[in-house]
Image (cartoon, rainbow, N blue to C red):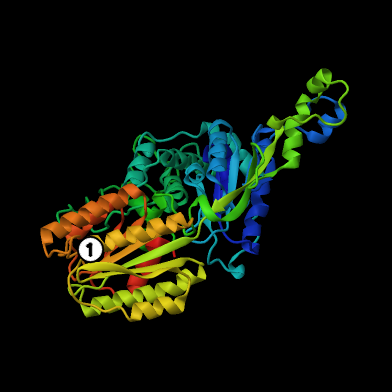
Amino acid sequence: MALALLAVDPGGLKGLWLRARACPQRDHVTAALDVLPLPRLRLHPGVSDEALYGGVDLAATLANGRTVRNRGVLELPSALVLAMAERCPPGLAVRLGQWLDSVPGVVIALDEGTEDESPPHALTDRLGLFVDLDGLGWQDSAPIRLDPERLARARANLPYVTTPPDALDALARTAAALGIASLRAPLLALAAARAAAALRGADEVGPDDLRRAVELIYAHRALTFPEQDAPEDTPPPPPPPDNPPDPGDDANTPDPENLTLPDEILLEAARAALPADLLARLAMGRAARISKGTSGTGAVRKGNHRGRPLPSRAGQPDSQSRIDPVATLRAAAPWQAVRRALQPDAVGLLIRPSDFRLRKFQESSDRVLIFTVDASGSSALARLAEAKGAVELLLAQAYARRDHVALVAFRGTKAEMLLPPTRSLVQTKRRLAGLPGGGGTPLAAGLQVAMEVANLARGHGMTPTIALLTDGRANIALDGTASRPAAMADAARMARVLLLSGIPAMVIDTATRPQPELRALAAQMGAPWLPLPRADAHRLSAALAGALGV
């Protein structure tokens, strides 16, 4: 259905976000892209600006003695198949987004990433349709066969499809109820509903078309979900009329003046199409992490190891960069006629320092998870044991992702770093097992030491993330005095410093009853707050894994 609607209105739906690893099931979908009424081209995440917008044809320019330019893939409407879309850099996502806004083209994003990897929001927000093939077995798949004549009739009928006056209003209310802030979503849903109506040969959008649009457009965008429980004072439904209308009269042709589709029906359609683990991920704070633009791997910045190649840029060569000879020749080729007129006796190509193009690589950093554990007496031995168990369960997952792990504990009157950033599972488990409990709760000191470890990791090119596990009952100030007001004030001040430093964090409330003070502290840190009053080690581990992307 997604492919059929995209073939009917490619300019309105913009594209398809296809999440699936390379498999025969995905081949069935990509093979069916031939139904799109656009030429199909394939893109790589590392595509250069010359390939997108056109550039100098080096061989033809040197052979003809004049500048010969290639046509870029973005100059004409086409269906662009973006391979490995989860690796799409933000710059390419913006370029493709601008192209989709101005040209009736289509982007098919082939997402092969894991749960915490996805294409940039600037691209996925513009792609109307989403299909997830995870969990689909070979026995459940088959080649997709669409009728080209039926699609052609639907495309011809699309301009004449009318929309009921309250259809867009219902789509907008449903988007608001699902927490979808983008204004593109209702417009994309309306385009999907009109394409569905044209596909079934109707002249106007009906309730089934709206439900289909909500399933395909809204389900993967939903961030919240309203409760289904109806209030107790809900009036009963009205009795049926004495003379019900004949179902055979205009049964499939809704009256646009009387089309009133309850919002609950559209919400239920979105709920039915939700990914299986979406609501669970939202409960664990995953949506907040995604909205901040973080991912499961280290940040793309000045890091500690070299990543994928980037397009060449102008610059002067030095000991840390190399010249890209092809890009340098392409930059110098258009000026050969002018330079040869100024230097008629020169032999060979005339290259100036301004022609130099340097080969660049994306630098990424390893991530370090800084577990800051409350080992005070108020945390209680049982809760401390659960926290230890959760960290141990998470260590194996972090090790599999090649993350570094650091351990900070606070109890008594001070905090200490029990383990610097390391990948050693044996050392971490040994230090964690020997962590004693009891004494006061120097929460501010724990945050201070955790931030020092994070800044130290940043200095080594890593991306730090702080996971704070505490019951929030701070009673020891930074100077070591026992004063609950002073301890909370110091903790609030350290939280604000942590927010200004830009270090991502996660607060796990391990108290028997969730503490509002700790929730306020998490807000001051700009960190998600997750209360787990009756959680065992497995649930704590799952919550941390979902929130931190481990």
Q: In the orientation shown, which residue stands out farthest toward the top?
A: 341
Residue for point 73% across, 36% down: 328
Q: Along the horizontal axis of the image, is 340 left or right of 127?
A: right
Q: Is residue 119 above or below residue 258?
A: below
Residue for point 12% across, 62% down: 484
Nearer the observer, 11 or 66: 66
Q: Quadrant of residue 353?
A: top right
Q: Is residue 456 above or below residue 89?
A: below
Q: Quadrant of residue 371?
A: bottom left
Instruction: Tally the marks.
Output: 1
**What residue is shown with label 1?**
443
Nearer the observer, 510 or 234: 510
Residue for point 43% across, 59% down: 457
Q: Position of residue 127 (x, y in %)?
A: 52, 44
Amino acid, disc 1 = Leu
Q: Is residue 523 visible?
A: no
Q: Position of residue 262 (x, y in %)?
A: 31, 47
Secondary structure at badge 1 equals helix
Q: Position of residue 141 (x, y in %)?
A: 61, 64
Q: Position of residue 133 (x, y in %)?
A: 55, 61
Nearer the observer, 330 or 167: 330
Q: Is residue 444 visible?
A: yes
